[in-house]
Image (cartoon, rainbow, N blue to C red):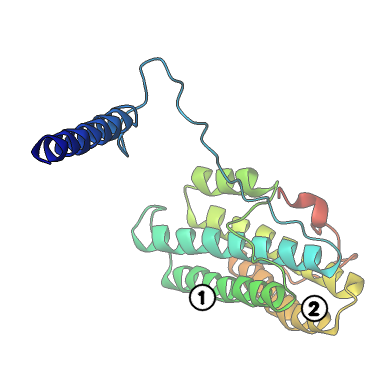
Amino acid sequence: MTGSGTTRRRFLLGLGALSGAAALAACSNTAPPGSPAPAGTPPPPTTTTTTPAPVYEGDAALMAVAAALSGLVGDLLGQAGTGAGQGRYGSVPGVVTAFLSGAAAQHVAHAEAWNRLLTNAGRPPVDGYPLTVEPVLRGRLVAAVAPVDLLGLAADVTATVTATITAIAGRATETSTVALAAGVAPVSAMHGATADFLLGRPPTAPTDPTAGALGPDALTV
């Protein structure tokens, strides 16, 4: 019995040793989590997500033009008013500085109203001033050296806004678009008339109220 018991114990110990060796071999053949890739292995491809540019059609395209133009004019006149207050353009009468700053604030408010209309229609608001005319208009502000240059710029850009919004009122099909255009156009026309008055120009009515209007093709998005 003793010899049989000893033999049985040796047999079980042998099985235990074999099981331990097998487990050790299995562990040694499996790379631990997070181990670096072997040298020469190319990195995994990276994926990037590009947000497509918004597409504006129909009334949304008209709203987008109005939002971009109103925002651009508000920005230009705001910079002109700030520069005038800092003496950048020589001695600027206080009435001119006040006009530029006040008109700028109203155009910015108009841009926000157009963007709200876009959002209500399920379209994204206009980001920035994506218009083909932006570089030329900014160039005029950069080239300005006197109050008369600022007023001339104000007269021209507000005339463009008035013509564009008037054209939108005639082309739009949505009641909300027409209603907002009907409220914005007279304010912009008042700005133009004020700039002309400060320049000493006689008041005149345009032969074609939509001459110089920007259309959807002026958008760069």
Number of numbered markers: 2
Q: Nearer the viewer, residue 31 or 42?
A: 31
Mark 2 secondary-structure assignment:
helix
**Place of residue 49 in the rendered image (x, y in percent of width and height, measured from the top left):** 58, 46
- Who is closer to the viewer here, 37 or 161? 37
Given this view, does label 2 or label 1 mark the residue nearer the observer?
2
Q: Position of residue 72 (x, y in %)?
A: 60, 59
Crowd class of label 2 (few under 14; some 14 to 19; many from 20; radius 10 Å): many
User: Which element carries disc 1, helix, strand or loop?
Assistant: helix
Residue at horizontal 61 percent and vertical 46 percent from the top: 50
Q: Which residue is mark 1?
A: 102
Q: Position of residue 152 (x, y in %)?
A: 61, 57
Of label 2 and label 1, which has the lower sequence position?
A: 1
Q: Is residue 205 visible?
A: no
Residue at 73 percent across and 83 percent down: it is 183
Return the mark for residue 146: none
For the question of whether residue 174 can be seen, the reply is: yes
Residue plotted at (8% across, 39% down): 2
Q: Residue furthest top?
A: 40
Residue sitting nearer the eye, 154 or 61: 61
Please name whichever residue, 140 or 65, is drawn nearer the observer in this view of the structure: 65
**Circle 1 crowding by C-alpha within 10 Å: few under 14, some 14–19, many from 20:** some
| Residue pictured at 59% horizontal, 59% vertical | 127
From the image, which quarter does the N terminus lie in?
top left
Structural distance between the alpha carbons of marks 2 and 1: 24 Å
Residue carrying label 2: 177
**Image height of 150 relative to 35, above or below:** below
- Place residue 185 in its image quadrant: bottom right
Q: Which residue in the rendered view is the most extreme toward the front?
A: 1
Position of 131 compared to 60: left or right?
left
Amino acid type, callout 2: Thr
